[in-house]
């Protein structure tokens, strides 16, 4: 594919990925504020305890086949059809097993109310399995606009459902229903936008060419979910539902922040990097451009979120959630690096190195699991600090494997990432010290946002950032 054509498709994909994730985070924010004001931390804690089981089951039923379908050079109807019937059959089996194990899950958390909630919540990953091939089709063909519209429609419908049930007094059942409605609606939208349809031809032979690649991604995704939900597991076991709820509330806001960037970049990263995988030099250029763009967006967004966390939490969902604001401040700092890590992993997957992706993720997840278990007696904040340190430090390991593939030097990678990170950190730190004497919460949050929002682009512009100027030129071109 010519350089200008790939660049245009990438820019268009990033634009629609940004619109999609921006709209989703705004909607998530609106629905989340209303729901959090109605429900309490124990309600969120109940659902949070079950999330790890749903996520692992979801990974098992997807089995890494989405990336495997995207990575195939040539693809047929039979490939999609085999994945559809395999994933839906496996997910039904997993649902029945987990529904039967619900009493054991309730015993683990010492909470009998989790039995019916678990059997209801787990329906979500079965419904999600029905849309895997359609999602992969849209992803493979860079149909980012269609995926964006699907997500927005699903979020509007599910968010309205969740808020309505919360108002009617259904407590944590409303949160669980919201998740189920979301996956059901988004699958219907994928079905509408994708021209592919399943047929009653039960031929699983196409899976043989994908299973070596996809099985490694399956194990990787499981460890990723364990890694991302360590706190929900450990806190649910050794702390109260209220403390789990406070953490989950903070983690939800953190997820909204870094998912905005990760989702935008991930919507194009793997397909684009896969198209230039046979030319390491060109792939390195494309990867560095994506790396600079990711850092340019991620650091001001996440460090800015950390800066305004106490005021934002108090004004939006009430002072009863203020303990979660202090947790969010720490999580958001670590969250600034997650989109960068995600881009590194996409590079390895595009090179077909699912084995490296798998073993490195397992090593990282195991290290964090052991360390978090040893630290739980010392409190949540200390656990989070060490967790962040491991995540950030592990970027050096990811970089080593990327260097082996495309010979990207550590100096250039640090320069691409840290130039934006350092500027954002200095600006947020300066704004914090300049505004800390202001007592009025409305003036405080307004001045923080305005000061950081003006200073960051101004300094980036004065520094001569090519990434900023290219992004601005593209947006102005689209507007005109």
Image (cartoon, helix red, strand yellow):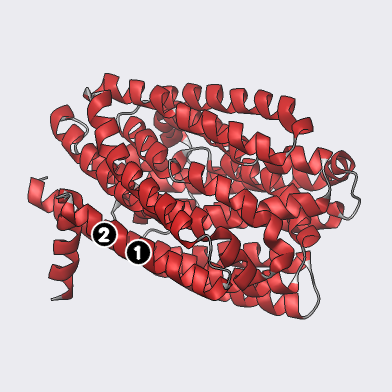
Instruction: List the residue tagged with mark 1.
Output: 453
Q: How many badges with numbers are in the image? A: 2
Instruction: List the residue tagged with mark 2.
Output: 457
Contact between labelled residues 1 and 2, with CB atoms less than 8 Å apart: yes
Question: Which is nearer the eye, 440 or 23?
Answer: 440
Count residues near mark 2 (Cα–Cα under 10 Å), then give few for <14, some for 14-19, many for 20+: some
Question: Can the viewer see residue 173 in this picture?
Answer: yes
The residue at 47%/54% (across/down) is: 433
Question: Can the viewer see residue 263 in this picture?
Answer: no
Q: Position of residue 245 (x, y in %)?
A: 74, 55
Residue 77 is marked as none
Specify whether 62 is left or right of 430.
Answer: right
The residue at 34%/50% (across/down) is: 265
The residue at 30%/49% (across/down) is: 296
How far apart, in angstroms, are the residues tagged by discs 2 and 1? 7 Å
Question: Which is nearer the eye, 84 or 38?
Answer: 38
Q: Position of residue 252 (x, y in %)?
A: 60, 56
Q: Position of residue 479 (x, y in %)?
A: 18, 74
Count residues near mark 1 (Cα–Cα under 10 Å), then give few for <14, some for 14-19, many for 20+: some
| Above or below, comparing residue 207 to residue 171 in the picture | above
Q: In which quadrant of the rendered view does residue 231 lie? A: top right
Label 2 residue SS: helix
Work out which quarter of the rendered image holds the C terminus and state it: bottom left
Label 1 residue SS: helix
| Above or below, comparing residue 351 to residue 204 in the picture | above
The residue at 35%/34% (across/down) is: 344
Specify whether 14 is left or right of 197.
Answer: left
| Above or below, comparing residue 143 to residue 217 in the picture | below
Q: Position of residue 107 (x, y in %)?
A: 90, 41
Question: Which is nearer the eye, 374 or 182?
Answer: 374
């Amino acid at each position: 594919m010519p350089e200008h054509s790939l660049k245009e498709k990438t820019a268009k994909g990033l634009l629609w990925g940004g619109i999609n994730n921006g709209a989703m985070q705004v909607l998530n924010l609106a629905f989340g504020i209303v729901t959090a004001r109605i429900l309490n931390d124990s309600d969120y804690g109940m659902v949070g305890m079950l999330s790890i089981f749903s996520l692992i089951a979801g990974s098992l039923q997807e089995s890494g086949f989405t990336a495997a379908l995207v990575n195939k050079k040539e693809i047929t109807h039979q490939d999609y059809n085999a994945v559809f019937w395999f994933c839906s059959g496996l997910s039904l089996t997993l649902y029945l097993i987990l529904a039967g194990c619900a009493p054991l899950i309730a015993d683990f958390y010492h909470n009998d109310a989790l039995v019916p909630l678990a059997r209801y919540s787990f329906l979500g990953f079965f419904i999600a399995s029905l849309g895997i091939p359609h999602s992969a089709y849209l992803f493979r063909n860079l149909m980012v606009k269609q995926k964006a519209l699907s997500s927005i429609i699903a979020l509007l419908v599910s968010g309205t459902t969740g808020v309505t049930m919360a108002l009617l007094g259904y407590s944590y059942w409303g949160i669980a229903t919201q998740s189920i409605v979301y996956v059901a609606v988004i699958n219907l939208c994928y079905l509408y936008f994708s021209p592919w349809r399943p047929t009653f031809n039960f031929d699983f032979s196409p899976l043989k060419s994908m299973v070596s690649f996809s099985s490694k991604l399956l194990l990787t995704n499981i460890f990723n979910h364990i890694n991302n939900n360590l706190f929900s597991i450990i806190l649910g076991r050794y702390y109260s539902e209220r403390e789990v709820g406070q953490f989950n509330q903070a983690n939800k806001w953190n997820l909204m922040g870094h998912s905005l960037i990760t989702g935008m970049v991930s919507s194009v990263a793997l397909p684009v990097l896969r198209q230039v995988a046979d030319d390491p030099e060109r792939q390195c250029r494309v990867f560095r451009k994506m790396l600079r763009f990711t850092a340019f967006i991620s650091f001001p967004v996440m460090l800015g979120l950390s800066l305004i966390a106490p005021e934002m939490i108090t004004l939006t969902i009430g002072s009863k959630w203020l303990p979660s604001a202090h947790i969010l401040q720490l999580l958001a700092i670590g969250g600034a690096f997650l989109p960068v890590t995600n881009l590194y992993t996409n590079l390895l997957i595009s090179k077909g190195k699912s084995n490296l992706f798998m073993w490195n993720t397992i090593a990282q997840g195991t290290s964090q699991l052991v360390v978090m278990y040893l630290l739980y007696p010392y409190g949540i904040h200390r656990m989070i600090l060490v967790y962040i340190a491991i995540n950030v430090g592990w970027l050096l390991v990811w970089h080593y494997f990327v260097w082996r593939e495309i010979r990207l030097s550590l100096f250039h990678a640090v320069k691409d990432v840290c130039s934006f990170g350092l500027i954002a950190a200095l600006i947020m730190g300066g704004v914090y010290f300049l505004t800390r004497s202001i007592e009025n919460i409305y003036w405080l949050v307004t001045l923080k946002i305005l000061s950081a929002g003006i200073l960051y682009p101004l300094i980036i512009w004065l520094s001569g950032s090519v990434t900023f100027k290219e992004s601005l030129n593209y947006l102005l071109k689209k507007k005109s």
